[in-house]
Structures are given as structure tokens and as C-alpha cells.
Image: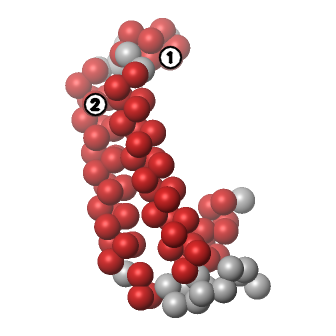
Amino acid sequence: MICLYLFLGTMRKQLLTWRLLIAYNIFEIINTLINVKYISVAELERLLGSQVNSDGLWVNNIAASLAILLLTQYIYRNKEMFSNRRYYLF
């Protein structure tokens, strides 16, 4: 439901969607960093039932966070494209 709202809000250039996209991306970055810090590789291996490469896990999570951070920067710099100031989509 949230993804549908974000998609429709982006298509209608809604300013509230701009704020929600930035908030969601910041939440994702913080969530990824907390997961990397507090979930150990041994615990992840126990839950998955298979061996996990710790370096690959770290690199993939940091790369995903970096991609989300760059996307957030792009969205932030294009605020003027979100010109619809109404709170409701329809």
C-alpha cells in the first residue's frame, strides 16, 4: 500500500511524497547500519541454515546503503519537480 502511494504520489508530483521518500530512505539506511552492527554472522548462519560470507555480507549491505543514499540525494536535489502541495492524491 505504501509503495502504491509513493508511486502514485511521484507520478502526480506531490510534495508530501517527496518528504515520505526521503524519510523512508533514511529509515532504510539506519536499519541497514543497525543490522550490520547488531546481527552477527553466526546468528545469521544459524537462522538461514547455511554458511554466510561475512565480508560479502558487509560489502553488500554497505553498497545497498550507499545506493539508497545517492538516490536520496537525487530526490532531495529535485524538490522543485514535486510542485503539487495538496495532501491527498485525488
The secondary structure type at the circle numbered 1 is helix
Seen in the picture, residue 5 relative to 52 is either above or below; the reply is: below
Residue drawn at (28%, 30%) of the image:
58
Residue 82, x across and y down, in percent: 49, 85
Looking at the image, which is closer to me, 63 or 74? 74
Residue drawn at (35%, 64%) of the image:
71
**What's the colour scheme?**
secondary structure
Residue type at mark 2: give it: Trp
Q: Is residue 83 left or right of residue 3?
A: left
Looking at the image, which is closer to me, 86 or 47? 86
**Residue labelled with disc 2:** 58
Seen in the picture, residue 18 relative to 55 is either above or below; the reply is: below
| Separation of residues labelled 2 and 1 (CA atoms) | 17 Å
Residue type at mark 1: give it: Leu
Q: Few, some or many C-alpha atoms within 10 Å of disc 1 (few <14, some 14-19, many ≥20)?
A: few
Residue drawn at (55%, 65%) of the image:
20
First in sequence: mark 2 or mark 1? Answer: 1
Q: In which quarter of the image is residue 81?
A: bottom left
Residue 41, x across and y down, in percent: 36, 16
**Residue labelled with disc 1:** 48
Looking at the image, which is closer to me, 4 or 27? 27
Q: How many numbered circles does the render carry?
A: 2
Residue 35, x across and y down, in percent: 42, 30
Residue drawn at (33%, 72%) of the image:
74
Task: Answer whether residue 19 is visible to the viewer in this image.
Answer: yes
Residue 14, x across and y down, in percent: 58, 82
